[in-house]
Amino acid sequence: MSLTASLLHLSPKLSTQFLHGSSTPLSPLSKPTSSLSFPTLQRHSFLPPVRALKYLQGRVVCSTSDKTVAVEVTRLAPHPKYKRRVRKKKKYQAHDPENQFQVGDVVQLEKSRPISKTKTFIAVPLPAKNVKSKSGEEDASKELGIPLESQQV
């Protein structure tokens, strides 16, 4: 006598669909709803997607190729074991259409479509920074419009 037959004989109230291996499909459960649910935010289709790594800054180390410069980018990263910040250097090939950059120039790299197998950046000159002259006293008196004590007689 099999086990299923003995179970049916002992308790006829047991459901036979589970004993024979055939089960009825469960009804699909509905997702719980709440009055506190927040509306989903919709992204506007006219906004461009956010992309990471748009700009890098580095120093030109080689400009012998035509329309191409090699730029060395230095960044600080924590050491895996000692957790001290260590300088990491990486060289990128960048497109220089007018051959305007020389060795030692500091440039900004903009991400672009692939120009060749290794070139995916365009070299752009850095915007000029506001550099103060060494004669700080004269600049300060001109900015304030009043003479400083050292200039008064």
Image (tube, helix red, strand yellow):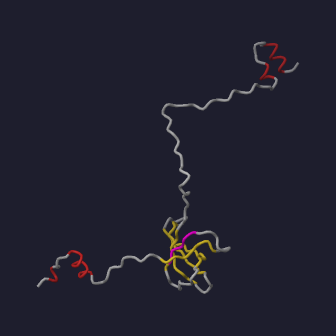
The foreground one among 8 and 40 is: 40
Q: Is residue 28 left or right of residue 55?
A: right
Q: Which residues are magenta?
A: 107-111
The quarter in which the N terminus is drawn is top right
Q: Quadrant of the C terminus?
A: bottom left
The answer to whether residue 94 is left or right of residue 15 is: left
Extreme residue in the right direction: 1
Residue shown at 59%/69% (left/top)?
A: 112
Task: Determine the main secondary structure of the stretch shown in magenta.
Answer: strand
- Above or below for 34 versus 52: above
Q: Name the spot of residue 29 as percent of width and height, x first.
A: 64, 29
What percent of the width, then of the height, locates residue 149?
15, 79
Residue closest to the eye, 109 or 8: 109
Q: Residue at x 52, y 67 (%)?
A: 77
Determine whether, in the image, residue 14 is placed left or right of residue 41.
right
Q: Residue at x 52, y 79 (%)?
A: 59
Reply yes or no: does residue 90 show up in magenta: no
Q: Where in the figure is residue 97, as x and y percent of width and height?
A: 58, 80
Is residue 108 on the magenta stretch? yes
Most extreme residue toward the left is 153
Q: Is residue 114 above or below residue 14?
A: below
Q: Position of residue 140 (x, y in %)?
A: 24, 77
